[in-house]
Image: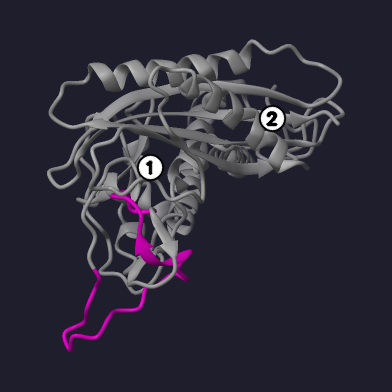
């Protein structure tokens, strides 16, 4: 099982999508401390988690993993939802491209499930308005 | 001996009801084990309810991770509905599930000593965000007893589907004519 390849299959399209925005929006992945929570700078946090690995399937492949992708978008609080929703749209579009990738003989075959959200929240203390989507995935390592 | 066909509908209802109950028990036990447990109260607040019903609060004051059985999902509750939701009745459930941000504080006993968490922490150190699970190891007193996004990982990562399948399997096995030799079914 190549967990790193699976993680890369999710993270690269998201990094590219947010990096190509003008201005580029920083994306923070697991085990990377994001910008200090008291700043109003907008950013995106992506968490990729693993659930069941090598679940027996009807196919001969057992090199598969299931898990979840949680994307949180942090934008300035008190400025309305528009900017947050714009960035959420970028995230959802990047996830949807994963489902359009054809199955090849090598690499990682990746499919995401239905996307939950977006949900939005803001607390009194935090300076950010937070948008959140999450989805399930099934990934098969083909090499 | 074969069972009269007239019993089929009632037996089927019985099997479906029990399958839902067993599945609820399997799922709630997994949620209790995989979720955060500082005092254990949160683990005791899972309920299977019909949509719109209000769940109760925590069933215990803590000190252990709650263990669910069929008594927590009474048969009468599973007869009227067509589908059920498993929800947590704790006031702070959205924060414990990492769905909303919150404010977290160190727990002290009456003597002012820091209370030890019931479950072995996955991280002890400094808080890196306003979500429950955003704690990184290092200096500090912030404690997380379940990984960030544990709930979404459970529901989306295949474990919940596995528990659902296990529950249904048990329900059919325990039901009328469950596990009977071939040729002794309905006629």
What colouring method underlies this structural image? one colour
- Residue positioned 21% across, 31% down in the render: A76
User: Residue, x 38% and y 53% (percent of image)?
Assistant: B134
Judging depth in this view, the residue of B87 and B96 nearest the camera is B96
Q: Name the one closer to the observer, B49 or B178.
A: B49
Q: Residues within 10 Å of mark 2 (few under 14, many from 20)?
A: many
Q: Are marks 1 and 2 on the same chain?
A: no
Residue B175, visible in the rendered structure: no
As for residue A113 lying within the magenta part, the answer is: no
Quadrant in which the C terminus of chain A is drawn:
top right
Point 62% across, 15% down: residue: A99
- Do callouts 1 and 2 mark residues in contact (Cβ within 8 Å)? no
- Find residue A40 and report its horizontal and vertical position in percent: 23, 37
Label 2 marks which chain's residue? A
Q: Residues in magenta? A: B106-133
| Quadrant position of residue A140 | top right
Secondary element at tag 2: strand
Which residue in the structure is indicated by mark 2? A139
Tag 1, which secondary structure?
helix
To which residue does mark 1 refer?
B75
Residue at image location 32% in from the left, 50% down from the top: B129
Using the image, name the chain to which the residue with label 1 belongs: B
Looking at the rendered image, the quarter that the N terminus of chain A falls into is top right
């Amino acid at each position: 099982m190549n967990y790193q390849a699976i993680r890369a299959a999710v993270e690269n399209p998201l990094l590219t999508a947010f990096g190509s925005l003008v201005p580029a929006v920083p994306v923070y992945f697991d085990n990377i401390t994001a910008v200090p929570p008291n700043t109003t700078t907008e950013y995106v946090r992506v968490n990729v988690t693993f659930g069941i690995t090598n679940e027996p399937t009807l196919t001969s492949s057992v090199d598969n993993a299931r898990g979840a992708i949680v994307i949180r978008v942090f934008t300035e609080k008190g400025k309305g939802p528009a900017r947050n929703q714009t960035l959420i749209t970028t995230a959802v579009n990047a996830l949807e491209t994963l489902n359009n990738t054809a199955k090849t003989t090598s690499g990682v075959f990746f499919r995401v499930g239905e996307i939950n959200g977006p949900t939005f929240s803001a607390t009194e203390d935090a300076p950010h308005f937070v948008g959140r989507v999450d989805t399930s995935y099934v990934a098969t390592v083909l090499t | 001996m074969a069972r009269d066909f007239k019993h089929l509908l009632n037996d089927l209802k019985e099997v479906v009801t029990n399958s839902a109950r067993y599945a609820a028990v399997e799922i709630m036990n997994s949620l209790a084990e995989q979720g955060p447990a500082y005092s254990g109260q949160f683990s005791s607040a899972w309920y299977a309810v019909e949509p719109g019903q209000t769940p109760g609060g925590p069933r215990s004051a803590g000190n252990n991770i709650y263990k669910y059985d069929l008594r927590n999902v009474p048969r009468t509750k599973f007869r009227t509905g067509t589908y059920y939701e498993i929800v947590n009745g704790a006031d702070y459930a959205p924060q414990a599930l990492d769905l909303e941000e919150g404010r977290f504080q160190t727990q002290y006993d009456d003597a002012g000593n820091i209370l030890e968490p019931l479950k072995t922490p996955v991280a002890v150190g400094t808080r890196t965000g306003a979500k429950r699970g955003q704690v990184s190891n290092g200096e500090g007193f912030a404690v997380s007893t379940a990984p960030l996004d544990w709930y979404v990982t459970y529901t989306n990562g295949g474990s919940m589907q596995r528990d659902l399948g296990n529950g249904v399997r048990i329900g059919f096995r325990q039901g009328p004519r469950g596990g009977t030799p071939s040729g002794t079914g309905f006629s």
